[in-house]
Amino acid sequence: HALSCDAADCLSLGMRDKDRDFPSVCVARRDSGIESPEDLRGKTVATGASDSPQGYLIPMLWLREMSVEPGEVVSFDIDLGKHGDTAIGEIKALEALVKGDVEAAVLSEMMYEFALNGDFPEICKDELKKLVDVVPGPSPYVFDHCQFDALAPSHPACPDPTGWKAKAFSEAIFNMDMANPVHCKVMKLEGINNCWMPHREEGYEVTRRALAASTTRPQVPLTNRGGKFPPGSRSFSSWNNGSMWRSRFQARQGLRNFSTTTRENAKGRKVGVIGGGVAGLQAIRALRAKGFDVTLFEKSPDIGGVWRENYYNFGVQVPKQLFEFLDFPNPSPVGH
């Protein structure tokens, strides 16, 4: 939401009640001697992806504003660009903490509770409870972290210049009622506790503050501490990660125009598509339709990306027809 508002005029349509005041936690090994946030000075701290509000940006802002600088921050940059949505980096940070590779970690309270319940096979819940605890004292700032946004009708690229679609969408979700059995099923699939809520800009102020703090500091070299941590992790000599991920967002602004390539000048030209997820598959289909010779590069044994294997308790709450090509429909009665 914060990035969208920086780039364009946005209209906020609503959000889940559970996404207000979303908390992160700072946890540490019991044998680390860390008894307060101040004790993190000079320690090695693991985080989620460096573009994750809950797993990196806001906890790092919290430490910075307390003038607490860790000796080293190990950022598990898995699924960069998703802003911490899959939270796999947070799981890896907690896994490194249990193994003793780091002394502390920051992650969402939700993911920590999942781990305590034994929901992640890579983390033994009994070992976690024995070796790790929440650091006493102040906790990282809470924030609002997820909502529906649309381009404002005043924006020249808005496909809904009258605003009727946005209004109809908001009316639909705000008219949903947990007491209605039909509504209740959908609301529970969405993770709603009681009801949909209107957005509130004040819930994003801490995120904006974290963005401003992270993009005004210089970049520092990235290493992997001699291969101690798995692929996807990066070790920073301090919390400064510069504007790496924000620059990627800004670079994408130049990719909004539709391609004017014709079949004639595409013939014989080869294109590589990296990643066979939903976006990659759409890119392949569009490029082949233009006449390009396309090769897919996918590290997994199968296609589908995060729609094939996603974060804990992930589910799709929309009709399968929204995730199929007209000429290659999902099988009935169940689509995969």
Image (cartoon, grey):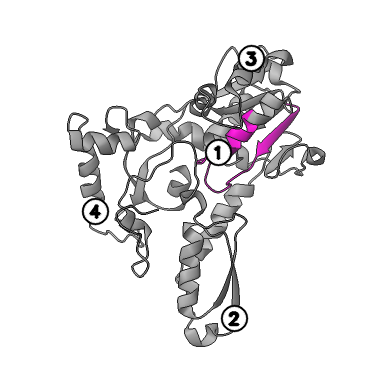
Q: Quadrant of residue 325?
A: bottom left
Q: Residue tagged by mark 2? A: 269
Q: Kindly report the distance in space between the C-alpha atoms of the residues bearing marks 1 and 2.
A: 37 Å
Tell me the magenta residue range. Answer: 69-94
Q: Nearer the viewer, mark 4 or mark 2?
A: 2
> Compared to 266, does 111 lie above or below?
above
What's the mark number on residue 165?
A: 4
> Compared to 159, does 57 lie above or below?
above
Q: Could you tell me residue 174's position as x and y percent?
A: 22, 37
Q: Kindly report the distance in space between the C-alpha atoms of the residues bearing marks 4 and 2.
A: 40 Å
Residues at marks 3 and 2 touching, judged by CB atoms closer than 8 Å? no
Asked if one can make out residue 114 in the rendered structure from this viewpoint, the answer is yes
Q: Nearer the viewer, mark 1 or mark 2?
A: 2
Q: Could you tell me residue 259's position as x and y percent?
A: 47, 74
Q: Residue tagged by mark 1? A: 52
**Under tag 1, what secondary structure?**
loop
Q: Nearer the viewer, mark 3 or mark 2?
A: 3
Residues at marks 1 and 3 touching, judged by CB atoms closer than 8 Å? no
- Say few, some or many: other residues with alpha carbon within 10 Å of mark 2 (under 14 / 14 to 19 / 20 or more): few
Sequence-earlier tag: 3 or 4: 3
Sequence-earlier tag: 4 or 1: 1
Instruction: Give the residue at the far right of this rendering.
Output: 226
Q: Could you tell me residue 173's position as x and y percent?
A: 24, 40
- Identify the residue at image location x=33%, y=37%: 189
Foreground of the two, 208 or 303: 303
- Identify the residue at image location x=32%, y=27%: 193
Number of marks in the rendered image: 4
Q: Is 60 placed left or right of 14 in the picture?
A: right
> Compared to 133, does 200 lie above or below?
below
- Say few, some or many: other residues with alpha carbon within 10 Å of mark 3 (under 14 / 14 to 19 / 20 or more): few
Asked if one can make out residue 47 in the rendered structure from this viewpoint, the answer is no
Q: Residue tagged by mark 3? A: 130
